[in-house]
Amino acid sequence: MARRKSISTVIEAAVTFIPYNMGEFEVTPYIEQQYTSVYYGVREIYGQVCKKSDPQFDWEAFNAKFEGCFGKVEDEKNSLEELGKFAQIYFNKSIEEVIDYNRNSLNRRKKSTSTTEMPKLKTIDKVEVVEKELPY
């Protein structure tokens, strides 16, 4: 009877064919492409939790403090795994849940800004100018 391969052996075998030397054609794993969504999702969840406990919550001050601790999104001060662990420990959310939370938050903001926009005025194609002398 053939011996079954362990899970770790299968994973190691799968990893060996991943093309690390693709140079300019190399792609990053999908989950790493989601760093921005995870960063903003964690910030949003954290801010909402703080907002519930503080009636005078200031988003600008919070965002500045968050950036000071977690760095700017483009700096990637923390790894995706660290952000994921933070979300899991403090908010009981997985990376996928944080991404969904961020997506829903973006959709809510888009809807709220689209309903508060000024209505578009009709454009006038022709303007008829009538010259008339005024009786002064």
Image (spheres, rainbow, N blue to C red):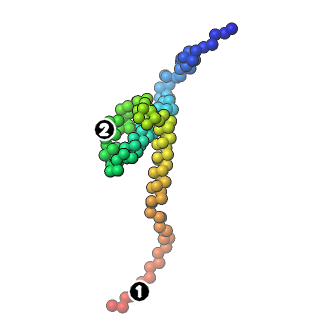
Estimate the x, y position of residue 67 in percent, counting from the top left. Answer: 33, 39
**Of residues 129 and 3, which is closer to you in this image?**
3
Residue bearing mark 2: 68
Estimate the x, y position of residue 114 in percent, counting from the top left. Answer: 47, 57
**Of residues 17 and 78, which is closer to you in this image?**
78
Q: Residue at x 56, y 15 (%)?
A: 9
Residue density around tag 2, few if under 14, some if 14–19, many if 20 or more, within 10 Å: few
Estimate the x, y position of residue 51 in percent, counting from the top left. Answer: 37, 47
**Of residues 30 and 102, which is closer to you in this image?**
102
Residue bearing mark 1: 132
Q: Residue at x 49, y 73 (%)?
A: 126
Q: Is residue 27 visible?
A: no
Q: Is residue 72 visible?
A: yes
Amino acid residing under circle 1 = Lys
Check the image and report above or below for 29 versus 44: above
Q: Residue furthest top?
A: 1
| Count of all numbered marks drawn on residues in the image | 2
Amino acid residing under circle 2 = Gly
Per the image, label 1 sits on a secondary structure element best described as: loop
Quadrant of residue 129 in the image? bottom left
